[in-house]
Amino acid sequence: MKFFILIASSIFLWFPQVVHAAEAPPESSWKVLAIIEKGGIMMYPILFCSILIVGIGIERAYNLRRKNIINTEFLKNIRNHWNWKDVHLGLQLCNAHDNSLARILKTGLLRFGGKLDEIERAIEGAGQHEASLMNSNLRVLGAVANITPMMGLLGTVFGMIKAFNVISQSGTGNPGLVASGISEALITTAAGMVVGIPALAMYHYFRGKIDRYVFEMEEISFQLVEELSYEAVREKKAQEEDDDSPPQASGKSRQEIRAAL
């Protein structure tokens, strides 16, 4: 969240400084509306993109909080009640909590009793589905990060065309009109970069965060399901051997458990 606040503040604070350094305007022109007016028509879509990325950033920062993905309280409860003899209790816990990890574990529990490979494929499929949900709106953020610098470049072209039209019509005798076109070109270029760079930074930040969540959820899910499978295999072997003492199977590998199932 601190990262997002830093990026969002840079959009509103950095741009006036860049414009001031480029053309040193009077103090009255520091206002945002004056900057937009000087930048020409391309400033309006760039301004819309800046509002869009702030909205997406707030929405993603809120929905990608850890308690919405891997709820610590839920994980503690599910570990305490993780018993292969009472899978329904685990399902009840998953239904009682609305987070990504609960939905992935529910998918694995619903298929418990089948082959371990099938359970793992179901968990992987559920993890990919949750990852797609977490990646919602990020495609728009990535598109904005790529498009806004090109909008700034297009505004630069418009500004240079304006400047050269003035030169072709009145020569270089009126430098104020020529400077107006060049100013428009510089402002739109700066605006496109100021919006595009934070958007790209936020895109990669959220993508990295989502990848870490998905990896962690899959690891937790596989570990818990294999614990259930191992307990089921051990109990089955104990019944077959009709022995009071449990078999010494603590060293069983993952492949051996799969073969037993």
Image: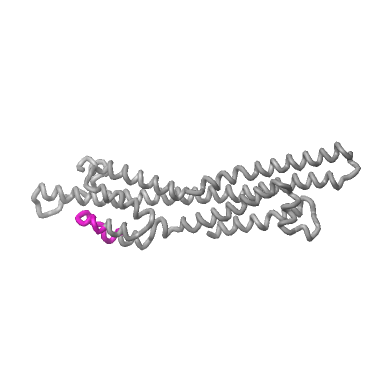
Name the residue furthest left.
242
The residue lying toward the viewer, choosing from 256 and 150, is 150
Q: Position of residue 34 (x, y in %)?
A: 75, 56
Relative vertical location of residue 158 with respect to residue 83 in this rendering, above or below: above
* Quarter that holds the C terminus: top left
Magenta includes 84?
yes
Magenta region: 78-89
In the image, is 227 to the left or to the right of 22? left
Q: Majority secondary structure of the magenta segment?
A: helix
**Render colour scheme:** one colour
Q: Residue at x 60, y 56 (%)?
A: 8
In the figure, residue 89 lies in which quadrant? bottom left
Q: With 73 as the anchor, is 168 left or right in this view?
A: right
- The residue furthest top is 168
Q: Position of residue 73 (x, y in %)?
A: 36, 63
Front residue of 3/33: it is: 33
Asked if residue 186 is among those painted magenta in the image, a careful observer would answer no
Residue 12 figure quarter: bottom right
Q: Residue at x 33, y 50 (%)?
A: 221
Give me the residue at 63% from left, 51% from top. 48
Counting the numbered discs, the total is 0
Q: In screen coordinates, is 206 left or right of 9?
A: left
Q: As displayed, is residue 241 above or below residue 31?
A: above
> Which residue does the image show at 21% across and 47% down from the upper left?
113
Q: Position of residue 160 (x, y in %)?
A: 77, 40
Name the spot of residue 104 as percent of width and height, x first. 34, 51
